[in-house]
Amino acid sequence: MDITSLNTKQTESEFEDSNNSQATNEDNNLTSTNEKLIEKNIDFLKENIEILQNQTNTTKIEDNNTIKQEPIEPTKQEFTQNTNEDSCNRAKPQLAIIIDDVATMQQYNSIKSVPFKLTPSIFPRSKATPNTPQIAKQAPFFMVHLPLEALNFYQKGHRWILTSNTKEEMQTIIDEITRDFPRLEYINNHTGSKFTQTYESLEKLLDILNNEKITFLDSRTSSKTQSAKYYANHNITPQNKCQSVFLKRDIFLDNELDIPKITQNIIDSINLAKKRGYAIAIGHPHKETILALKNATNYIKDSGVELVYVNELVIK
């Protein structure tokens, strides 16, 4: 078995645009650092290959009816959005890493095992994911990962928002989500390549989210997404005064489940944050992604970039 190339198929076949925003290396010294970090990941994988092969797939949606941990009440600082524009300053470049597709407590615990801030994006409650509101109670900060209609992808058990839905039907779904997740502030889309490029449908949904004071972050599962057009056409006041109204994913970490490639995407995310001041990356609770993030801990700490929750990003 070639342990340096553990490739598997993409979990979401519609991620056509995953590499559009990839940053390049800043200088020759960073190239050398990158190579050393990738070598370190390969060595780490060699040492842990038996564990990696024997672990159950953490992305499998399971019915987890036992929640052993007591809910942790989030602090004010973690759940209060910035309202004073004078405080909207970055001490360092910022990187927010979102972990999508969170469906079980096992997945959330794997995210917590990484020693820096990661934002879990949790599926709404459904037949496939009945216990997700309980997961949110454990998290100091979370988002909801909203299933939107895709062009060529479908998963049973989720409750999808479709282009054929009326605005009233969409409102009913969002009302249920806000009851299940009363502290909800941010939503990003699960799949949605068809929905996000259908302007009339996206406009209905974003009107609802704005009225509910929920910020939409576009996962950019399609290069034809219409979210930028929506915000250009509407005078929307951002819910978070330290952020622009239009938030979007920059880099996908794990379209290929190959630890060296995931590591390079982590490096690219750090580089983009240094260049622009901030970056938003999205990964998934795959065992390969969690291993790569853990193994990059020292590199991230030494990078000069601050890992933050999505609501702590300063984007002006």
Image (cartoon, rainbow, N blue to C red):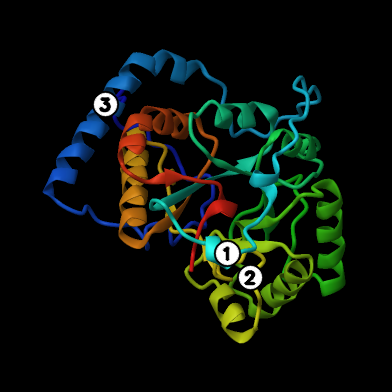
Judging from the image, what secondary structure is the residue with disc 1 in? Answer: loop
Query: Taking 272 as reference, is 218 left or right?
Result: right
Identity of the residue furthest to the bottom in this view: 233
| Position in image of residue 288 (x %, y %) | 44, 31
Q: Sequence-wise, which precedes: disc 3 or disc 1? A: 3
| Position in image of residue 107 (x %, y %) | 62, 31
Q: Mark 2 points at which residue?
A: 238
Q: Sequence-wise, which precedes: disc 1 or disc 2? A: 1
* Marks 1, 2: nearer the viewer: 2
Q: In this view, does 236 lie above or below 290?
A: below
Q: How crowded is mark 2: few (under 14 residues within 10 Å), some or many (20 or more)?
A: some
Judging from the image, what secondary structure is the residue with disc 3 in? Answer: helix
Judging from the image, what secondary structure is the residue with disc 2 in? Answer: loop
Q: How far apart are labels 3 and 1 at the CA level?
A: 36 Å
Most foreground residue, 53 or 291: 291
Q: What residue type is labelled 1?
A: Ser
- Name the residue located 84 percent from the left edge and 47 percent from the top edge: 180
Image quadrant in which you'd find residue 125: top right
